[in-house]
Amino acid sequence: MKVAFRGYVDGIEFEQLIWPYTKILYNYILSKVSNAEDVQDILQETMLAIWQGMDNYKGNSSFKTWAIGIARRKIADFYRGHYKDKDFHNLEDLDIGRIPGESNPIDHAINSIDIENSLNTLPLEDKELLFLIFNAGLNYKEIESITGISEGTIKSRVYCLKKKLRPLLVEGGI
């Protein structure tokens, strides 16, 4: 499978290969790091690591899963490098985006705040799961390969998260 993948890469530019995943990678990093410059730096480091690691991609997972795994490691490297930095901040919010069907900007703003407040009640690990499922569009098996959490545990956590968030979102009028 590696040979076929390398032939595919040789047939197109790296930018064409990575372009569909750039927004997902950016938002994933943004969900973990608050400073825009740091997000850009980590994204660049991730892109470089993907480029340098192309020969190591075996095709055992989707390219998107593999790329998010690299981004996750680059974020961990960033945290390790800035652990003692007092100016370091961590953004714990998901990029919730626009709510489909919202025609009134005031209602949209209120609902966005309700969602954000509900998500802020969650631990970081749960926010990461929600991001990987809803923003990155990964399945449980792909998330297992990135996080090391078993597929069964992921399913259980997602079930509990839905159960926990449902009353918070209904209470907020959503």
Image (cartoon, rainbow, N blue to C red):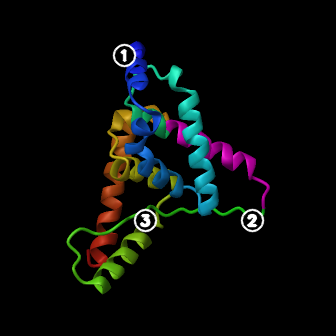
Q: Which residue is mark 2?
A: 87
Q: Position of residue 145 (x, y in %)?
A: 44, 31
Label 2: which secondary element? loop
Q: Is residue 172 magenta?
A: no
- Give the answer, above or below, for where 68 lies relative to 161: above
Task: Tell me the distance, in whole angstroms, between the alpha carbons under discs 2 and 1.
Answer: 46 Å
Q: Which mark is residue 119?
A: 3
Name the one closer to the observer, 173 or 56.
Answer: 56
Residue placed at 53% from the left, 33% from the top? 50
Tell me the amino acid under the disc marked 3: Leu
Residue placed at 40% from the left, 35% from the top? 17
For the residue carrying disc 3, how many other residues have a C-alpha within 10 Å: few (<14), some (14-19), or many (20+)?
many
- Give the answer, above or below, for where 150 lies relative to 2: below
Q: Can residue 141 be seen at all in this image of the molecule?
A: yes
| Magenta residue span | 69-85
Q: Quadrant of residue 112?
A: bottom left
> Is mark 2 in CB contact (under 8 Å) with mark 3?
no
Q: Position of residue 78 (x, y in %)?
A: 67, 48
Q: Which mark is residue 4?
A: 1
Mark nearer the N terminus (2 vs 1):
1
